[in-house]
């Protein structure tokens, strides 16, 4: 069974946003986006989830917008298939 995300959120990250990452003792990667504790957002990935996210991001960077403005926008998905 797939584990759903714990929070649904819309996050816009500008080009010049400060980004930092730390490895936790639980072998998770904790990304902090923003300049100060007041405006920072933290995203925590389990290692395998981050690998899938990075692959999806790489695939997304290869997409191009259709010339027809009425066409459906391209969309990708990366689903967990279990196992290691």
Image: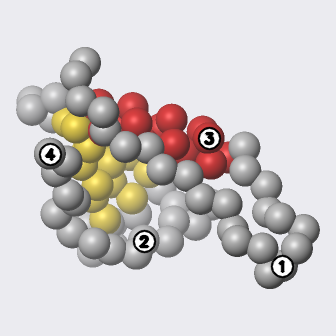
SS type, badge 4: loop
Horizontally, residue 59 falls left or right of residue 22, namely: right
Q: Which residue position is annotated with label 3?
A: 59
Q: CA distance from mark 4 to mark 3?
A: 25 Å
* Residue depicted at x 28% and y 72%: 8
Q: Going from the N terminus, do you reach mark 2 or mark 4 first?
A: 4
Front residue (pair 77, 54) = 77
Horizontally, residue 78 falls left or right of residue 59, namely: left
Q: CA distance from mark 2 to mark 3?
A: 20 Å
SS type, badge 1: loop
CB under 8 Å between discs 2 and 3: no
Instruction: For label 3, count other residues whose C-alpha is less than 10 Å away and answer few (under 14), some (14-19) or many (20+).
Output: few
* Residue depicted at x 51% and y 42%: 56
Q: Going from the N terminus, do you reach mark 1 or mark 4 first?
A: 4
Q: CA distance from mark 1 to mark 4?
A: 37 Å
- Decide if residue 61 is in sight here: yes
Q: Position of residue 14 (x, y in %)?
A: 58, 66
* Residue depicted at x 14% and y 45%: 1
Closer to the eye: label 2 or 1: 1
Q: Which residue position is annotated with label 1?
A: 69
Q: Quadrant of the C terminus?
A: top left
Residue 54 versus residue 12 in the image, above or below: above
Q: Quadrant of residue 41?
A: bottom left
Q: Position of residue 71 (x, y in %)?
A: 78, 73
Q: CA distance from mark 2 to mark 4?
A: 27 Å
Closer to the eye: label 2 or 4: 4
Q: Which residue position is annotated with label 2?
A: 11
Q: Which residue position is annotated with label 4?
A: 1
CB under 8 Å between discs 4 and 3: no
């Amino acid at each position: 069974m797939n584990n759903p995300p714990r929070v649904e959120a819309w996050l816009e990250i500008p080009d010049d946003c400060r980004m930092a990452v730390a490895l936790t003792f639980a072998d998770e990667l904790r990304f902090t986006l923003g300049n100060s504790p007041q405006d920072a957002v933290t995203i925590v990935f389990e290692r395998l989830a981050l690998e899938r996210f990075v692959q999806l991001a790489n695939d997304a960077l290869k997409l191009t917008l259709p010339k027809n403005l009425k066409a459906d926008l391209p969309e990708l998905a990366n689903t967990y298939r279990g196992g290691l």
